[in-house]
Image: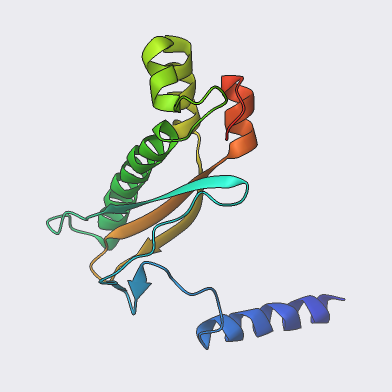
């Protein structure tokens, strides 16, 4: 039983190292691509991507990666808020319009975005970071008490 688990792990590691693993949307050989396909709103989730730069003056790679990751998460959250604001709800208004009339909806959107699931973290060769976050559409409907169109 243990042998099968070790064999499966080794095969997955070999496939990933050979380039058969998930391909990066944002990076190519550790460098940002010239063109990055933005995450879409299709399916059950609304996704957003953020990019954070590292301060090259920081003395260790760990510090640079930590700060660029934090910056990328903040950027991804900002992008996610922008996407959420554009979503149309029943009644034909956007979440942005609903936020203008209800501080409760504004607080709920902010809390949901802060709690968005981080689904991917990638570091560049210069310790920059690209992060993808997502939020479940059904969770948005439940939290806001609305139906998304």
Compared with 15, 67 (above or below) is above
Image location (x, y in percent) of residue 105: 47, 17
In the rendering, at what x and y percent does residue 56 appear?
Answer: 14, 59
Instruction: Please give the name of the residue rendered at 40% of the width and 40% of the height, measured from the top-left corner.
Output: 83
Give me the residue at 33% from left, 38% from top: 78
Residue 98 percent location from the top left of the image: 44, 18
Viewport quadrant of the N terminus: bottom right
Answer with the quarter of the image where residue 114 lies. Answer: top left
> On screen, 26 above or below 15?
above
Task: Identify the image quadrant of the C terminus.
Answer: top right
The answer to whether residue 90 is left or right of residue 71 is right
Q: Residue 55 versus residue 6: which sits nearer the camera? A: 55
Residue that protrudes farthest toward the front in the picture: 92
Q: Which residue appears at 51% of the width and 49% of the height?
A: 41
Seen as rendered, the residue at the extreme bottom is 18
Residue at 21%, 55% in the rendered image: 54
């Amino acid at each position: 039983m243990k042998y099968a688990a070790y064999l499966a792990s080794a095969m997955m590691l070999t496939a990933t190292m050979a380039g058969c693993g998930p391909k990066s949307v944002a990076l190519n050989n550790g460098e940002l691509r010239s063109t990055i396909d933005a995450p879409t709103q299709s399916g059950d989730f609304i996704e957003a991507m953020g990019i954070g730069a590292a301060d090259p003056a920081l003395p260790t790679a760990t510090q640079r990666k930590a700060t660029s990751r934090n910056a990328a998460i903040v950027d991804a959250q900002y992008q996610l808020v922008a996407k959420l604001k554009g979503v149309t709800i029943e009644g034909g208004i956007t979440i942005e319009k609903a936020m203008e009339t209800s501080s409760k909806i504004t607080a709920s959107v902010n809390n949901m975005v802060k709690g968005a699931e981080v689904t991917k973290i990638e570091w560049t060769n210069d310790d920059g970071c690209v992060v993808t976050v997502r939020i479940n559409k059904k969770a948005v409907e439940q939290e806001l008490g609305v139906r998304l169109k």
